[in-house]
Image (tube, rainbow, N blue to C red):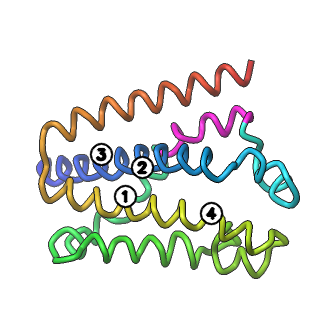
Amino acid sequence: MSTRMSALGIFLWRVTATHVITYFLVGITAMNTLNYEQVFSSGNLGAFMKSLDSPWVALGPALQVIRGLIFGLVLWPFRSIFLGKKNGWLKLWALFIGLSILATFGPALGSLDGMIYTTIPIMHQLLFLPELIFQSFLLSFLVVCWNRKPKRVYNILSIIFCSLILLMSIAGYLSLSS
C-alpha cells in the first residue's frame, strides 16, 4: 500500500510541478508577446478578465498548484494509457485539447461554448488558443517524458523553479494588495 501511495505522490508531484512551470513560462511569454494588458482592459474582456495589476492575477501562478493536483488525481487511473504506450504524450495532449480547451462544460475563452454563448468576439477568443495549445502540448510531452525517464536532476530543477514561481507569485500578491 505504501508503495502505491508513494507512486501516486511522485506522479502528483511531476504533473503539478510540470503544470506550474509550463503555465508560468507560457503565460509570461503570451502576456508579453500578445499584449494582454491592452487586450484584457478593452471591450468585453475588460469586464470578463481581471486587470494584470490585480493581486489575484499575481497570485495566479501559485494557485496553479491546485489545478496541477486536480490534473494529477484525474489522470492517475488512466496513466497506463499515456505512459505505457507509444505516442502516449499525443493521447494526453488530445485529451487536454478536447476536454480542457475546446469542449469545456462552460463558456471558457477559446472553447466552443465560449464562441457560441459569450459576447466576446471570436478573434479575441482565437487569440488565446496558441497559448492554450502550446502549454497543453508542453505539459503532455514533459509529463510523459519525466515519468518514462525519471532523473534526479529533474526533481531538483522542478523544486527550484516551482519554489521561485511560488515565491514570486506570493510576493506579487502581497505587493499589490497592500
Q: Which residues are magenta?
A: 53-64
- Looking at the image, residue 39 sits to the left or right of residue 72; the answer is right
- Foreground mark, 1 or 3, reads 1
Question: Which of the marked residues, 1 or 4, is nearer the chain's N terminus?
Answer: 4
In the structure shown, which secondary structural element does the residue marked by tag 1 occupy? helix
Question: Which residue corresponds to the image point at 42% horizontal and 49% vertical from the top-left?
Answer: 22
User: To which residue does mark 2 refer?
Assistant: 22
Question: Which residue corresponds to the image point at 66% horizontal and 71% vertical from the top-left?
Answer: 126
Q: Residues within 10 Å of mark 3 (few under 14, many from 20)?
A: some
Real-space Cα distance between discs 3 and 4?
27 Å
Question: Which of the marked residues, 4 or 2, is nearer the chain's N terminus?
Answer: 2
User: To which residue does mark 1 refer?
Assistant: 139
Q: Main secondary structure of the magenta part?
A: helix
Q: Hey, what amino acid is under mark 1?
A: Leu
**Is residue 57 inside the magenta stretch?**
yes
User: To which residue does mark 4 refer?
Assistant: 128
Question: Which of the marked residues, 1 or 2, is nearer the chain's N terminus?
Answer: 2
Question: Which residue corresponds to the image point at 63% horizontal and 34% vertical from the top-left?
Answer: 58
**Is residue 59 inside the magenta stretch?**
yes
Real-space Cα distance between discs 3 and 2?
14 Å
Real-space Cα distance between discs 1 and 3?
13 Å
In the structure shown, which secondary structural element does the residue marked by tag 4 occupy? helix
Q: Hey, what amino acid is under mark 3?
A: Trp
In the structure shown, which secondary structural element does the residue marked by tag 2 occupy? helix
Residue 135 x/y as whole percent: 45, 58
Q: Is residue 132 above or below residue 13?
A: below
Question: Which of the marked residues, 3 or 2, is nearer the chain's N terminus?
Answer: 3
